[in-house]
Amino acid sequence: MEFRLLGTVSVDTRTGPLPLGPAKRRGLLAALLLSANTPVPVARLTDSLWGEAPPLRARGVIQGHVSRLRALLTGAEAEAYGVELLTLDDAYVLRVPETLLDYQRFEELLMLARQQRGPTDTVRMLDEALSLWQGPALGGAFTEGPLQAAAHTLEESRLATVEELARAYGNLGEHHRAASVLRSEAVAHPMRESLAAALILALYRAGRQSEALDWFHRTRRLLADELGIDPGHELADAYALILRGGPRPCASPGGGPGAAAREPERPGGGPGVPGTAAASGPPRTAAAHGTSLVPHPTDLLPRAPRGFHGRNAELAALTRAAAGEAPVCLVTGPAGVGKTSLALQWAHHNPAACPDGRLFADLRGFSETGEPALIDVLREFLLALGVAPRRVPESVTAAAALFRALTDRRRLLVVLDNARDSATVRPLLPGGTDCVTLVTSRHRLEGLIASDAARPVPLDTLEPRDGTALLAGVLGEERILAEPVAARRLAELCGGLPLALRVTAARLAGRPQWTLAGLADELADERSRLTFLDVDDTGVSAALRLTVQQLPADAARQLARLGHHPGSHFDPYTCAALAGTDPVSATAALERLGSAHLVTETAPGRWVLHDLVRLYARGLDPSSGPEALISVLDHYIATALAAADTAEPGGEPCFVLPEDHHRPAAVRDFADRTAAMRWLAAERDDLARAAVAARSARLHDRAWRIILLQWPQVVWRVRDSWAPLLELALDSARAEKDPYAESRVLNLLGWVLTEEGRTTEALTLLELSPGLARRARDRLGEATALINLAVVQAGQGELDRALEGCGRAVTLAREEKDRHTEMLALQHLARMQLSDRRPEDALESAHTALALGPEHEEAARRSLLLAVTGEARLALGEQEEGIQLLDRAAEEAERAGYDEGAVRALEALLRVSARAEYRTRHAQALGRLTDEG
């Protein structure tokens, strides 16, 4: 998945670009991406999309676009890439790894280019950066105010990069290529003086003096005619140089965008690897400390990793972290993610960081052999620094003090690999302000961040592209190119974990007759995947086992139970249900697991497991699987019940709980309808997974309940592909031979099919529902079934049968004293009576219904009833009163964000009134419905 702003705003996926739709939605996406991982207030989004003249329902339009974007991202499996669109109070935040953003990669490549030692590497990096541009920034998006300014800033950065590329070509003596790069941009931006000056000098240095002079005079005339000004100093200096017949140096003219990149050449950095000098200020020199520039012969580093691929962003982050005074860089991540490889790659390609020597110690914090004694590590360091064996102190405190003293005036790199905790690291920190310490750990080591200002560089799994490149480094390009699809599938099945990828590559390298597709098929079976990812004494299971051994008992138990979770993510309530604890204890266990990089917090209170960790966790306590599954299913049922009750407080409960229901220790509390609906929307996929897991375990009584409890979300987003899930619920209800459940599911499924236009299928199902409800003695279920059946019958012209069924539903609801269902039945009855040309009866039914419903809970239904009342008045010839009622119905619908009701009321108004206001409001409501905002 890739998000593009450098050109047309788009989202590229494995199956092609997402259909983002109108310009406003692209503008909204651009605004969220430009502030990726940061909440963007609705007010700022409004300003970005409409400037100073937003429509009255700007917030509703934004909500609609966010909802559609969220659905598109969910359909593209964005969560697997760490992408999530969240609502936080009065703001939205798009969580997305920076590696998926083209403008972030552009900036990263610019930084890398400026740190290269030679112009050849600089040209390569700048070329790669500019290749990311596919047209004007934020193309295809509707931009106002902030977005317009952002597009201008991005374009300025691109032009400055073009100028830098031309300077790099000039440094190589390739002045013709420099002129070629600059000409097209100078034509497109004729009054950008820095471009013109650079082009004039490139032409002159390429021996094309007459062209250079011609371009100067053309630009001078344009500036005079358009702006009434003379050329600035850059153009004037370039012109004077040509007239003097001066030398043709490679250096570019001073000033102008991009000039800041012309720093003194710095040592360090290989192709594609950043150097280590600070981003600002003069580079540190060894001479300032009285030491030689020749690297000290002391070098304890292991060899550089073989087949290292990708990680440019992390290498650049290490370079930034290594700048400053006495930096401590902290590389953290899960087992097997490649922390040691990254540290060694950076260390080997940054000799400028350590002219006085490189020290390395494996602290074995997660090894079965145990950690080395600190005095032994310090002794090795002191001996390497030239201390005589007899002068090495015997205590850790004295040895650490001597180590700090010896390193005070040196520029050393100290790599401390596999640290278990902060206390182990502190005595091994050097004393010099010019020393760089690089620590790797599976734990976050927050104590080291607090006490020594350690700068964390978190390491995540590899993207499929880099994973495939790693496989190619072992197996050869030919084998990968022969099966590119299978290679990518292998990278995905390994979860982007370098250790898993290397084990996979080792298996294939020793078996040239094996195909990549064959091994991918083997790995696809979750039951044996971890077995295939172990070779000799190396593998994913072994690495994870060493991490888990360090956990306290409660955290290890929580991890084992998480392996049985059927969903993709979890919160403290879910974890508590799985482990049979409470949310506070579960939160503490999650924090411990997160510190060990066994779980990842993707948003506040929202955690995920890597696929391979999940498989390993499942094997820790397989016998607890059935109990854990039932507990988490009942947790979902209890929470969804609370959400439904909060979202639709006037609604009748769907069902009684199963007899063996496990009530969780705590159930999430929802403050209001918005919070409840947000939870139902966010958990939709996991609720579906839970239902599937329940059916697979033959827990049919849980499966249909979990699905049916989503009815508030189904009603609100009825055309959002609910039918397959409801069909699963129907299968489970029938497997239970439960007429109550079957009738209730048929009611909801039939209504969904009706809204989807599948009326024949809906009628077939709904005709079964009233009889099933009667068998179950579910009178309210029968009433709902009769209403839904009547709606379909009326649509097919069977008005008499529909009226009879709706009348029966009203009677049943009254007998059960259920105002909510009675109001619903009367609403549909009034509409049918109006269709039967009985406006007086329709008025009576609508008035009766309006007297039943509390206004604050029934805004949408009130709007529909007011519309029926207005149409009935019109049918009776009472035009003025009818128009007033319809106008009121439209206003209430607009105020509640119920655009379907607004469209219906305004269409009725336009049939009897030609007022421009109604036409405008109708167009706006229709636009919101079609997401054209």
Image (cartoon, rainbow, N blue to C red):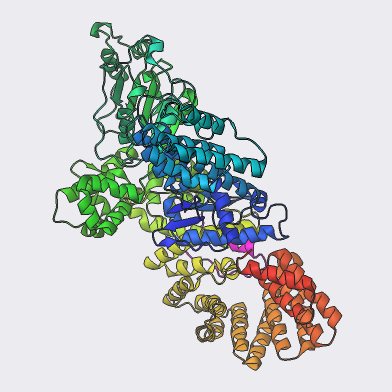
User: What is the quadrant of residue 21 in the picture?
Assistant: bottom right
Query: How far from the left and from the top, in percent, is residue 796?
Result: 59, 89
Residue 662 on the magenta segment:
yes
Query: How far from the left and from the top, in percent, is residue 141?
Result: 57, 56
Task: Tell me what residue is drawn at x 61 percent, y 87 percent.
Answer: 795
User: What is the quadrant of residue 338 in the picture?
Assistant: top left
Answer above or below: position of 529 versus 186: below
Magenta segment boundaries in residue numbering: 642-664
Query: How far from the left and from the top, in percent, is residue 158?
Result: 50, 43
Considering the whole magenta stretch, tell me its main secondary structure. loop
Who is closer to the viewer here, 451 or 315?
A: 315
Residue occupying the far top of the picture: 391
Residue 516 on the magenta segment:
no
- Tell whether 731 sits left or right of 645: left
Q: Quadrant of the C terminus?
A: bottom right
Q: Can residue 352 be spotted in the picture?
A: yes
Task: Tell me what residue is drawn at x 72 percent, y 78 percent.
Answer: 907
Q: Can residue 333 be spotted in the picture?
A: no
- Tell whether 604 sits left or right of 384: right
Task: Tell me what residue is drawn at x 39 percent, y 59 percent.
Answer: 14
Task: Tell me what residue is drawn at x 84 percent, y 87 percent.
Answer: 877
